[in-house]
Image: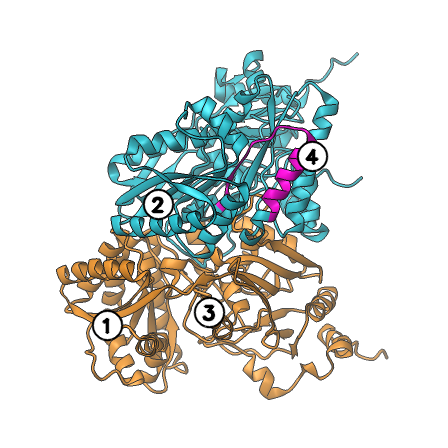
Chain colours: A cyan, B orange
Amino acid sequence: MNPIPPRPVDQVIAAARGFLGERITLNDAIRQQHSRGEDTTRPTLPDAVAFVETTEEVSRLLALCHAHRVPVTPFGAGTSLEGHVNPVRAGISLDLSRMTAILEVSAEDMDCLVEPGVTRQQLNAHLRDQGLFFPVDPGSHCTLGGMCATRASGTNAVRYGTMRENVLGLEVVLADGRVITTGGRTRKAAHGYDLTRLFVGSEGTLGVVTKIRLRLAGIPEAMVSAICAFETLEGAVNSVIATMQAGIPVARIELLDEAQMEACIAYSKLDHLRAVPTLFLEFHGSAAAVAEQAEAVQAIAAEHGGSGFEWAREAEARNRLWQARHDAYWAGIAWRPGKRGITTDVCVPISRLAEALLGAKADIAASGFEAPIVGHVGDGNFHTIILVDEGDAAQMERAWELDRRIVARALALGGTCSGEHGVGLGKREFLEPEHGAEALAVMRALKATLDPHGIMNPGKLLPDAPA
Amino acid sequence: MNPIPPRPVDQVIAAARGFLGERITLNDAIRQQHSRGEDTTRPTLPDAVAFVETTEEVSRLLALCHAHRVPVTPFGAGTSLEGHVNPVRAGISLDLSRMTAILEVSAEDMDCLVEPGVTRQQLNAHLRDQGLFFPVDPGSHCTLGGMCATRASGTNAVRYGTMRENVLGLEVVLADGRVITTGGRTRKAAHGYDLTRLFVGSEGTLGVVTKIRLRLAGIPEAMVSAICAFETLEGAVNSVIATMQAGIPVARIELLDEAQMEACIAYSKLDHLRAVPTLFLEFHGSAAAVAEQAEAVQAIAAEHGGSGFEWAREAEARNRLWQARHDAYWAGIAWRPGKRGITTDVCVPISRLAEALLGAKADIAASGFEAPIVGHVGDGNFHTIILVDEGDAAQMERAWELDRRIVARALALGGTCSGEHGVGLGKREFLEPEHGAEALAVMRALKATLDPHGIMNPGKLLPDAPA
């Protein structure tokens, strides 16, 4: 009788042990930590977790997985809200969080080169004394590699753009272990296919990002934050639309509805604020420009029932305000202990924002769920955090129904299912309605070209192929 | 004896006549007009020129060419400087210049949907009374389809970005005739692979763009132009570097060297100006912001030997100034009658601009050629227009040597062979030095996936495969 042949994944683990040693592990607690992100997907244990430290290690590990047809799921900080880091087909969870070197910073050219495990907070702490910052700010303690993977954006995108605009180039390890460099250091280029932007937003399904060249911004001469309370959600939304259409270059313009404000007031101890629809704003520029912008937005807000600005001019007060905004998701979850959140992420053209957001609000009311709303409304992007009992299957199904209704309306308004969180597992069903079958077929063809054995984050982004 | 079978291209022409009628033509003069662009490549006659008017016609024609393995070379306004529209393998020249509909304009969302034959001037004339403009401005009378194909930029890119940043979505006909829609109307999205940016800059080698959704900008409250003369080229370049590093949001900052100024003064009748290194500037914003920016740049220029600003505040004076700048290429050619231009297009990180530009200047002096220099220097991008006798093969070879030397220095400084003109025929040899063999292999794989028979603009962008 022949012995049972070793499983392919065991062959990979055994071979990888040769160059990773104890950094490829079968430890149960570690596998649990890598079984999903901050989402509500059903956790899946990877067969092993590999803590890589160099591009060469990534390359050798991927070449092994490619040869043995073993799935690889990249993992950064585990903050994904769409199931990206859930290794749904098991295999290797590739943890890049130890690749934290900041390799180069050029103050003259306002760019830097970092490894993917660096978080945006680490980078900004490093840059601060050079008068520079990296503006893309999703709020969570995510890694820059994860932000590349999901084409992240956040509160500053309305002024500074998303990862799409702020990544100058990448080093990528392809599925078969080959290493390529994309893009470059210049502000523009017409030098062939835009491989950088093919990988930005590809959610680990085409390769693994191992170095990132980022464009930086100068810390503005003046920064002022403000909050403004509104009588109605409609008034707040219409103020945003009018601000954007007036071309006022706000640095941040964020909306929290009354439910989200109630949650944030409790979580972040903002007892001086009221639980009414509120805009959080920030202005960047010269002192004169900031004053001019703030005055213009105040006038618009006043026309729509905004009750005057509360200012935060000092760094400490500003930081406290934005920390509260950044903690909105956690505040929402904590508001109703024991619940978890299903987060929608629709984005629409600004002229359709009122319809999309007030429509979502009505859907939430009709559904019986509690679902705080918070959004990067200057970009037409907002989230509803649908609070659910994860163990109640019928309730979960109703929550996903609500999610689908909010997305369907956004698509009908010319919007997208995801402004910034990515497709992952949760939004795959919307890809064909949004892009059409032919464009989806092109995406599948690109995937097959770059990852012929389908080992890179399988089950994510692309819907399962029709039978 | 069997009759000689018809050539594949004749079969395509015969079949296409069924739906294009006289709009597919073998007329000699028309084929001549489609034998190259504004470049110095050796003209090639296409077998036929097809003047398409609808997406469906493009789709049917490409499906035919795909089936019969007949090359297709898209043609817009014929302003390419890199040989893009030269049908080097004959076949069909696909002329899109009659697809000139402006299909939608949304002032509220500041976007529009246009056909590829619309020129930027036509679009801006159409937009003017809505307070909007399309900011990407390469100067020439090019089509927006051509601008997509080459990832064009130009004088405003330093403030408003390039086609990469300003194309929201596309309709593309693939090589086999399938029609896809990419991107969308939202300012950001994390909804799958970025097909839009895969096609922007692909130079007609992956498909044909038949609709373009563009992001628009509001016409600023105040616009002021100025020119500033310098004693030395170095002073002018260093003023640019200092301006950019100070983060001053200039809308345009263009450099013309003394040769280019001499040519422009003669061509555009700017007799009040001196043939010395000169910056052309423009400031956009509120009246206060414009004044603040202009003051800051004036102070920087004064430190570097700039001799005070000459202002152009009224639209007419501004337009005359920028018309002269836009005609720089034609002025360069006209400066030495009978000559044609080989145009370099290097782009470097801003900190290396002085080295790249002064190095190119020294190379030109050593070469014995006359070669005016003009550049979008805020982006680190500049052109040398090497004036050549096209019929003198030995001289042409020496001119290409000079071109190679200028590019090689830019690459060594972390730059690119092309900031905005594209790769076409002339820059293919630099693709592997710039990106590396593995990244080039990925580009080839993408091409093979989307155009398996290699019919789309063959011979362009990708270097010929190694034997």
Q: In the image, are marks 4 and 2 on the same chain?
A: yes
Residue marked by disc 3: B82
Q: CA distance from mark 3 to mark 1?
A: 35 Å
Specify whether residue A98 is painted magenta.
Answer: no
Q: Are marks 3 and 1 in contact (CB under 8 Å)?
A: no
* Quadrant assignment for the N terminus of chain A: top right
**Res A196 seen here:** no
Q: CA distance from mark 1 to mark 2?
A: 30 Å
Q: Secondary structure at mark 2?
A: strand
Q: In the image, are marks 1 and 2 on the same chain?
A: no
Residue at the image point whose x is 42% and y is 51% from the top: A300
Measuring from the top left, give residue B103's x and y in whole percent: 61, 68
Q: CA distance from mark 4 to mark 2?
A: 37 Å
Q: Chain of mark 1?
A: B
Where does the magenta region start and end? A355-377
Q: Chain of mark 3?
A: B
Q: Secondary structure at mark 3?
A: loop
Measuring from the top left, give residue B245's x and y in whole percent: 26, 51
- Total labels: the figure holds 4
Residue marked by disc 2: A283
Residue marked by disc 1: B311
Q: In the image, are marks 3 and 1 on the same chain?
A: yes
> Where residue B208 is drawn, which disc sits there?
none
